[in-house]
Amino acid sequence: MYVGVTNNLESRVAEHRAGKGGVFTRQYRVNTLVYAEKYRQIEEAIAREKEIKGWRRSKKDALVETLNPTWADLLDPSIVKSPSLRSG
């Protein structure tokens, strides 16, 4: 399970799906978005990321299942744009 912070979720997911993420995401083929939280302040997001990263896998699984019990992909791969195709 990958836990991270980004300011552009669609782009980050596209990178992971294209195999352009970090070593962990490439090695384990992390490419399905099953849970996300939104924060206004980056400091809050980073603190939450660190908190979740410190949890056991079972606790992370339980968190996902609170909002996504079927572990469905929350970002349809057909609508995610490749980072190289983004405008602006």
Image (cartoon, rainbow, N blue to C red):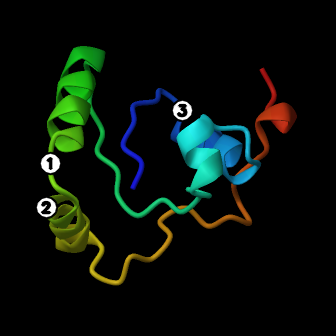
- Is 43 situated above or below 78? above
Marks 3 and 2, how far apart at CA: 26 Å
- Is 51 situated above or below 35? above
- The residue identified by callout 1 is 55
Residue at the image position 39 percent from the left and 36 percent from the top: 4
In the image, taking residue 31 as reference, residue 35 lies left or right, namely left
**First reached walking from the N terminus: tag 3 or tag 2:** 3
- Tag 2–tag 1 contact (CB < 8 Å): yes
- Disc 1 marks a residue whose amino acid type is Trp
- The residue identified by callout 3 is 8
* Rendered image quadrant of residue 35: bottom left
Marks 1 and 3, how far apart at CA: 24 Å
Marks 2 and 1, how far apart at CA: 6 Å
Residue 50 locus on image (x, y percent) = 21, 30
Residue 51 locus on image (x, y percent) = 14, 35
Residue 64 locus on image (x, y percent) = 26, 65
Task: For the N terminus, give its image quadrant.
Answer: bottom left
Residue at the image position 73 percent from the left and 47 percent from the top: 19
- The residue identified by callout 2 is 59
Determine whether the residue tagged by mark 2 lies in a helix, strand or loop: helix
Say which of marks 1 and 3 sits in front.
1
Task: From the viewer's side, name the closer residue of 72 and 38.
Answer: 72
- Tag 3–tag 2 contact (CB < 8 Å): no
